[in-house]
Amino acid sequence: MLLVVIIFQSSVTMAKEVVLLDFWPSMFGMRVRIALAEKGIKYEYKEEDLKNKSPLLLEMNPINKQIPVLIHNGKPVCESLIIVQYIDEVWNDKSPLLPSDPYQRAQARFWADFVDKKVYGASRKVWSTTGEEQEAGKKEFFEILKTLEVELGDKPYFGGETFGYVDLSFITFYSWFHTYEVLGNINIEAECPKIIAWAKRCLQKESVAKTLPDQKKVYEAVAQMRRRFVSE
Amino acid sequence: MLLVVIIFQSSVTMAKEVVLLDFWPSMFGMRVRIALAEKGIKYEYKEEDLKNKSPLLLEMNPINKQIPVLIHNGKPVCESLIIVQYIDEVWNDKSPLLPSDPYQRAQARFWADFVDKKVYGASRKVWSTTGEEQEAGKKEFFEILKTLEVELGDKPYFGGETFGYVDLSFITFYSWFHTYEVLGNINIEAECPKIIAWAKRCLQKESVAKTLPDQKKVYEAVAQMRRRFVSE
């Protein structure tokens, strides 16, 4: 009985000691929120105003000054994919995110890195530019999505039978798909039906469904941001 | 006695099954060579002609088509930092490269990622541009080096008392320092003495000393490359 009480207290303490500095439409922040949800970790969420960053953010991530930052027992971990790996290593008792086999883990890291380096840059061109630059961005965006579609193949998830690291790294962009479609005048499902089927499969998971914001709400926020880049 | 024979045979087989596709002046390729040397892994080195990439490279890394690629038992691992982590996980019996503590591991990943994202881009501007672009590149390069110098502090290595993942990720750029100094007309030691002292410390390790090419040889190769970018 004593043991049960101690475990319960330790779990509560740990929950109090996890803080996430984040910004709600950030696909990078969402990755961390999904990982925390998959592991069932309670945490304090602190929304950042990116135009007026908090002293805590600047103190915790003085190098990049970016969200998300996970603060665990007072110590910061920065960069979304590094945070997700950290969460997976510390809370390793349930819902493994990276595969246990070193070769499969290397492959998962390769594809998460591919998403990180390629999808964000191309998608940004789709919503924040016009004319030739936007057309080039749309072409690049679809090339990247089609590469990912080939990698997915007929598997239910990128890692195989279960939702994992690559899925988590990429699915957060789905909350922006409506924005890309409206602002870029594109139809993603027509070009990449398997990606959309995969995204809907991911959304059946509570950790994903509860994390991803409403696509219309993202669109409203991004349409406002677009005005800073584009005068139409 | 039987056991000894089996271990010996297995070790020989494994050695035969490791192939590295690389290009000698590549600081990314050198990372993998240092990791393999640290672990004492024998491998077949295959030099790539980057202007005329081999069918094997295109087959093994069809997505990025870049060196280095580690082929282990016929299966490719791409991207230098992912390869180094793979090597550290598979050959985990000696010379650990990443720290065992998850928090320290996250910090090592953060700084290796910082080197990856920042040092290459800025250093490239130092040697491949002229005029204002080069001046901006030099300023950026020194800012990055000084950030790394602060992180190093008074520790012998980035990870503390022993050579590890961040050291390995960054030291390979040292073979290009003479090139940056001559082509950028800069003096790195005058600005960042601790980085130079750290680099000389790393070079006392056989794995590093045997891997890093002669700085003059790198200069000759890069000076030729520079002519493709700059007409002086």
Image (spheres, coloured by chain):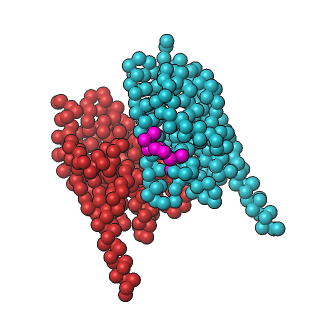
Chain colours: A cyan, B red
| Residue B129 image offset from top left, x and y in percent | 26, 33
Residue A150 falls left or right of residue A173: left
Q: What is the quadrant of residue B207 in the picture? A: bottom left
The residue at the point 43 percent across, 31 percent down is A142
In this view, B148 is above or below B212: above
The residue at the point 24 percent across, 48 percent down is B55
| Residue A190 image offset from top left, x and y in percent | 49, 28
- Residue lying furthest front in this view? A154
B126 and B49: which is toward the camera:
B49
In this view, B167 is above or below A29: below
Quadrant position of the N terminus of chain B in the picture: bottom left
Q: Does the rendering let one see residue B117?
A: yes
Q: What is the quadrant of residue B30 in the picture? A: bottom left
- Residue lying furthest bottom in this view? B1
Q: Does the rendering let one see residue B170?
A: no
A222 and A78: which is toward the camera:
A222
B222 and A144: which is toward the camera:
A144
B149 and A206: which is toward the camera:
A206
- Residue lying furthest right in this view? A1
Residue A86 among magenta residues: no
| Residue B16 image offset from top left, x and y in percent | 29, 66
The residue at the point 40 percent across, 41 percent down is B118
Find the magenta span and give its range: A148-159
Quadrant position of the C terminus of chain B in the picture: top left
The residue at the point 46 percent across, 59 percent down is A102
| Residue A78 image offset from top left, x and y in percent | 54, 45
Residue A153 among magenta residues: yes
